[in-house]
Every structure is written in C-alpha cells, then in structure tokens.
Image (cartoon, coloured by chain):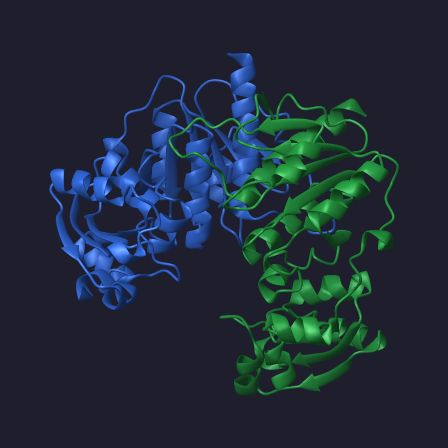
Chain colours: A green, B blue
Amino acid sequence: MKRLVRLRNRRTRDAEGRFLIEGYRELSRAVTAGVDIEEVGYCPELFLGSNEPALLAAAEMAGATLVQYGEAPFRKISYRDRPEGLAALARQFPTGPEDLSLPDEPLILLVESIEKPGNLGTMLRTADAAGVDAVVVSDPTTDPFNPNVVRASIGCLFTVPLVVTSSTEAIEWLRGHNVRLIATTPFANGTHWEADYSGACAIAIGSEQYGLSDALLDASHERVRIPMRGQADSLNAAMAAGIVLYEALRRRTAES
Amino acid sequence: MKRLVRLRNRRTRDAEGRFLIEGYRELSRAVTAGVDIEEVGYCPELFLGSNEPALLAAAEMAGATLVQYGEAPFRKISYRDRPEGLAALARQFPTGPEDLSLPDEPLILLVESIEKPGNLGTMLRTADAAGVDAVVVSDPTTDPFNPNVVRASIGCLFTVPLVVTSSTEAIEWLRGHNVRLIATTPFANGTHWEADYSGACAIAIGSEQYGLSDALLDASHERVRIPMRGQADSLNAAMAAGIVLYEALRRRTAES
C-alpha cells in the first residue's frame, strides 16, 4: 500500500521505473494495451459499475496480483477525491523513438516542455480522438507517468504511440523520417486554416508560458497561428493542440 | 482578509453577491470590463512584472480601496500555489438574458450543466478567442463566479458577454431571437464539419458526464458529432467546445 502512495512522487517513479494507474477506464485501456501491471489494489465497495470483476480477471490473466482493500485503506491509497476502487502498480514502458513503428504518412503531435500534467493528459486524449499516429513529448517538464497525466488522458497514455525525448533529438528524428514540421506560434503570418497538412507531418505545440523553442521554430517548414478574435491573447496549450489537430484531420479526410 | 478567504465558498458568494478575482491578467481584464471592484489586496513582494502599480492605480480610480499586505498574510488570502500579489473583492455582475445586447447574426456558445470550474473557465477563454458574441451557461452545476472559473478563464469571464439561466429559459430565449441551435452529441449522424453555421446560431455542449439534456436535443435544429478516430469514446467538454467553435469561425470567416 505504501508503495502505491510513494509512486505519486516523481523521484520514486523514476527510480523504480514504475507508476500508478487509477480508475476503471484508465486501467481498462492499460490492460488492453498490454501495459505490464504488477499489482491491482481494489475495493468492491467503491466500484461504480458492474464490469470491474471482469477487468480484474483480465488483469490477473495478464499476470497482475490482485489485492483487496477495505474502503478506508483504499481511500488512503487513492489519489482521487472520488476513488473508483481500482489502483494499479505498473511498469513504465519504453518511450524511445526506436520503439515506434509508424504508417507511411503519419500525423504526429509534438508537444514541447509542457508543464501541467492536466494539459499533457488532455493532449493525449485529444490526440487519440483525432487519430494521431504518435505523440512526441520533447523536453518534458512533467513526466508522462505522472498520475494526473494518466487521469486527464483517461488512459489514452496507453492508446497513443508515445515518444519522450529531447527537442534536439525530436528534430533529428523528424528530419530522418522526412516529416514536415508545422510550428504553432502567435507570431506566424499564416493561419492554421491555410497550412499544408498533407503527407507525413508533425504539428508542434509549445509550453504554456513560453511557446516553442527557437530550435523547433527554426527547424519548422511552416509556421501557423490560430486566429484570435477576442481580448485575450492566447489559448490553453491543450486547446490549441486540439483545434489544429482537428483542422489537420478535416483536411486529411477531405483530401484522401 | 477573512472576507476574501470566505468568498472561496459558494454559499458566501451567493449570499453576499460578491466574488474573488486573483492574478494580474484576471484583475486587469476585470478593471477594463468595468467590473465593480470594491477592494484590492496587494503584496508588492509577489508581483511578477512591473505593470502592477498602474493596474492598482486604475482600480483605485474606478473606486476600489487598496490594502497592502505582507507576504505571509497575502499567501493566506491567496487561492493559488503561486500567488501574483493581487487579490480583489468584486461585486457579481448581472447575467440575465435581458442584460445582453447582441449583433445581428450572433455566434453563441451554450454550455449546459458543466460541473468542473476548470472546464467552464477554459470554455470562456476559448469563446473569447473565437470571437463568440455570448456564452449562455444553462443549468450550471458550478457557478461562474467560482475562483477556479476566474482563473481558468484568465479573466475572460469579464470579456465575453455572459448569460446564466435555466435550459428551459435558454431555449425560449434562443427561439425568441431566431437563433439556430446546433447540438453536439456523439449520437448524431452528421459531423461538425458538415453543419450549417451561417446566420444567428448557437452551439450547444453538454455536461462532462451526461452530455446534453433531452430538452436541448429536442429543441435543436441540427445535431452534430465530432469524429472520433481513436480508442477513447469522448473528448473533454471544453475541448469539444473549442473544436466546434473554431470550425464555426472558419466557416463564418470563409463565407463572409
């Protein structure tokens, strides 16, 4: 039980190479994706639906040890205000570019130095919805195994192919795979409605505070801005990603 | 000082008709929008930039009392992990439909029963960016004067014309103004790319858990879904709003 609680801490996660998965949808997507789950703590009194026993059976079949908890101790394990009675200890999976297999003309989302776990999680969830072929997380400030990333992604951390690397290596890797890089920045002349999303392309979104680094801006083939019609000067970073991704999906759907 | 802290609580906000505004951008937009600010607590040691004294002067000119705090007491007032040294006590402003003046062919965002303050705030921020003419918040679960709405909206609570009402009244009001209602639901046949966004129209987004009510679905002129290409079955509600709003903006820009 203490092991699960300690994994809320990044240093423990990095040292142990493990992380925490809470919630029904999150655990369900992890099991389906073949994430190595070592242990599942569960508390039937907190289950919200009726499919939890089947999910536990699937996790056990895949090699997880099941440990039942009473309601009070489970609430101590849980990271959430409204626990769903499922909390698993899992091994972090590899996120190197070499572990990725891509289709011929992939659509990639590259997110640089994202600071807020909620934003990174929402980006993963939205990338899944938009049918993105890979999410590249470069120079991350928050690690993708943060429990709030798992939560905000509602388990899409496990459904979208993921690469975690430096921005320098990401640029090299995109070049090596002949991927066009479309950088979003408020200082571009063209809008995201005018961009060329055909073929192999990556959409780059920068950090909440500082936007994209000069290295990524310089490496880009095209720079685009999202039109702003109000008094505020920016969108939430995850929102910006979703708006550009869905425009890319629209165009790639219409053109195919 | 205690008065400011107590306004974190909804019952106090409702009873007093006041609310809390923290942060530079938030307070700045409130002052510009003419929100009635009664008192501004400030702490120069925590200022992040150099424009805070000018903002304080503007707030004082508009009638606010300024109260300086030391760092320790200010941190107790502040709702935030990283306080910016500005926390104001303001009067809630009217949000009835009768207080709203609209252009000829408005674009409206209607959000029903939104539960999470962060989502409602992000919707307001995104509505501002997309140049929406009004946001109608119907049957709200979270009140728009919640400090987390102010924060996630980064003050766009004050820049976008806002109506708070019941869904029943919202439907009547839209009918009375000949506004076409476009309802988003995963069960629609057509996609949001195919919708008719011309003229006076309102885009309706439902609650995080349950989507739109039957009343709003039945009252709609068109139902649309956002295409889902991944393994997850839904987008974050604020994200869905942003994706449809920017498609509407694209089409209304292209067609005008």
Q: How many marks?
A: 0
Image quadrant of residue A105? Answer: top right
Image quarter where the C terminus of chain A lies is top right
Residue lying at 57% horizontally and 80% vertically, measured from the top left: A77
Image quadrant of residue A185? Answer: top right
Q: In the picture provided, is B24 more to the left or to the right than A93?
A: left
Residue lying at 22% horizontally and 60% vertically, measured from the top left: B4
Q: Name the residue nearer the viewer: B183 or A186.
A: A186
Residue B124 in the image: state x and y as whole percent: 41, 40
Residue lying at 79% horizontally and 42% vertically, measured from the top left: A172
Residue that protrudes farthest toward the top in the picture: B256
Residue B129 in the image: state x and y as whole percent: 45, 32
Vertical arrangement, residue B11 with respect to residue A8, above or below: above
Q: Name the residue nearer the viewer: B115 or B173.
A: B115
Residue A193 in the image: state x and y as whole percent: 62, 23
Residue lying at 43% horizontally and 27% vertically, measured from the top left: B131
Q: In the picture provided, is A256 more to the left or to the right than B89?
A: right
- Residue B219 shows up from this direction: yes
Image quarter where the N terminus of chain A lies is bottom right
Residue A12 in the image: state x and y as whole percent: 64, 76
- Residue A1 shows up from this direction: no
Q: In the picture provided, is B212 more to the left or to the right than B81?
A: right
